[in-house]
Amino acid sequence: MPKVRSEKSRIIKDKIFKIVIFLLATITIIPLFLILYYIVQKGLKVVSPEFLLSLPKPPGEEGGGILNALIGTGIIISLASIISIPPGIAAGIYMAERKESKLSALARLCVEVLQSIPSIVVGIVAYIWIVMPMQSFSALSGGIALGIIMFPVVVRTTEETMKFIPGTLKEAALALGVPYYKAILKVVLPASLSGILTGVLIGIARIAGETAPLLFTAFGSPHLELNLFKPMSALSLFIFNYATSPYVEWHELAWGASFILVSMVLVINIIARVIAKRWKTRF
Amino acid sequence: MKTRGVAQSNLIFNAVILIGAAGVIILLLAIFLTLLVHSIPSLKAFGISFFFGKEWDPVNMKFGALPFLIGTLITSLLALLISIPISMSISILLGEYLKEGMFSSLLRNLTELLAGIPSVIYGFWGLFVLVPIVREFEALIGIPPVGVGIFTASLILAIMIIPYSSSLGREVIELVPSDIKEAAYSLGATRYEVIRYVILPYARSGIFAGILLSLGRALGETMAVTMLIGNSNKIPESIFSPGNTMASVIANEFTEATEKLHLSSLVEIGLFLLIITTIIGLIGRYIIKRISLKETEHA
C-alpha cells in the first residue's frame, strides 16, 4: 500500500523539520546567553560606587573607575540631543503636515538613506567638518557625529506619530479660531508627545553604544574632561581602548564599563516602551 | 494689528518646519559632497584602478582597495551563510510554531536585548571567548592557531545580525494571510508542507529583502570586525587568514593618516561604502514597502 507509506513519510518529514527548527533556534540561544552571562558575571565583579566615581588608574594598579567615560558619554549624548531633536521635530512636523508634497517625499527618502549610512562614515564626515578646521579632536565633533545618527530617528518617529493624530483634532482647534501654528504646537504636538519621546529615547539608546563615529572625533581621554573643545572619553570608546590593551586590570575595567553601558541601554529601552504603552493618547 | 501678528507667526512657523524638512535633504547632500570632495586627490591619483590595486602601502603611497573589497565581501557573505539558516529557523519558530508562550517570549526578548548591545561589546566578548575557541579549532585542523582573522570576524558578524534578520523574517512570515494557510491545511497538508510550499514561497521576496538589509548591516559594521579580523592589508589567502574590511581599515588608519593622499584614499573607501550600503538598503526597503502595500490591498 504505497499511499499509506507516503503518508507516514510525510508525517516523519514534518516531525524532522520541526525538530531541526527547534534545534537550530536553541543552538542560537547558547552564544546569546553566553554574551549576557559574560557581561553580567565579569561586570558585576568590578562594579561598585567607587568604580563609578573614580578615574581609571595606570596599568599595574588595582582598582580605578570610569568616571571620565561616564561623564563624557553624558555630555556627548546631551550635545547630540540638542543638535538633533529640535530640527528633527521641525522636519517631522513638515512631513506629517504636507504629506503629499514633493519635498516631503524626497525628505522621506533621504531619511531612509541617512538611517542606513554606516556609522563610521558619519565619523569621517564629522572629522572633516569639525576636527579638521579646529585642528583638534573634541567632544563637540563627537556630539555632532552622534547627532547626525540620531536626527533621522527623531524625524521619522515625529512624522509617524503625528500622522496618527486624527485630523479632526486640528480642525476643531482651527474652527475655534486658533491660529494654525498654535493648533500644531499646542494641540497636535502635545498629543504626539509620548510617541516623540519614545523615538528620542530609542535614538539615545542607539547612539549610547556607538563607538566607530567617536574614534576620530571625541577620540577619548584618560582625564576628567569637561571642555567641549578638547578630546573626551565615552563609555564605548573606553571599552574599546581598554579591551584592546594588553593589561588584565584594564580588561576588568572594560568589563565593568560594558556592564554599565548595557544596563544603560536596557533601562532607556524599557523606559521608552513603558512610555509608549502607558502614556499613549488614545482616540 | 493682532491678525497681522498671527499671520506673521504662521509665516515663521511654516518657514521653520520647511527649513527642517529641507535640512534633511541638505544634510544628506552635504555628507555625500563632503566625501566626494575629499576623495578627489585619491580619485585623481588612482582613478578606477583604485578598486583593482592589490597593494595598500601607506609608506610608499600606493593605495589599492582590492584587499578590503575582498575582505568585506568574504566576511559579509560568510556571516550571511552562517546566520541565514539560524535566523530563518527562529523566524519560522516565532512566526509559525510558537506564536506565544514562555519559550517564544524568552527568545523574542533575548533577541531584542541582543540587538541593543553595542558592537564594541560584541568585539570585546569575541576577543575573550571566540578567539580561544577558534584558535583550538585551527590547531585541530592543522593551520597556525592565530585566533583572529576573517573567520572569527564572520562568526561575530553572524551572531550580531541574527537578532536583526530574524525579527525581519518573523514580520514577513506573519504577513502571510491565514486564509491561504488554512486552505492548505484543509487539503490535508502537514505543517512542514504548509511552510515549505505556501509560507516560504509567499514570503520569498520579503525574506530576500531581509537578507539584503542584513547584508547592508554587515557591510558597514565596524567595531567588532576591527577587533577580530587581524588587520592585515594583504589579500586574504584563506578564510582563516587575517584581513581588513572597508570599515575596519578606516577605523584602523584614519587617525594615523597624516599624508593627504592616504587620508583621501580612506575617505574614498568611505564614500564607496556609503554608496553600496545606500543602494542595498534602498532596494531592500523598496521590496518590503511593496509587500506591505500588497498586504493592505489584500486585507
Image (cartoon, coloured by chain):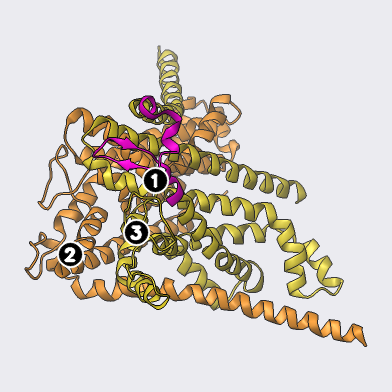
Chain colours: A orange, B yellow
At label 3, the amino acid type is Val
Disc 2 crowd, CA 10 A, few/some/many (<14, 14-19, 20+): few
Image spot of residue A167 (x, y percent): 59, 36
Can see residue A217?
no
Q: Nearer the viewer, residue B136 or A280?
A: B136
Which span is picked out in magenta? B43-71
Q: Nearer the viewer, residue B151 or A222?
A: B151
**In this figure, which residue is indicated by the disc labeled 3?**
A265
Dot label at residue A43: none
Image spot of residue B80 (x, y percent): 53, 59
Label 1 close to label 3 by CB (< 8 Å): no
Q: Is residue B98 above or below residue A142?
A: below
Label total for image: 3
Q: Residue at x 41, y 54 (%)?
A: B236
Can see residue B235?
yes
Image spot of residue A217 (x, y percent): 24, 41
Q: Residue at x 41, y 35 (%)?
A: B50
**Chain letter behind tag 1:** B
> Rounded to the nearest whole Å, what is the CA distance between mark 3 and mark 2?
27 Å
- Quick one: label 3 or label 2, which is nearer the N terminus? 2
**In this figure, which residue is indicated by the disc labeled 1?**
B246
State the SS at label 3: helix
> Rounded to the nearest whole Å, what is the CA distance between mark 1 and mark 2?
26 Å
Q: Are marks 3 and 2 on the same chain?
A: yes
At label 1, the amino acid type is Met
Dot label at residue A246: 2
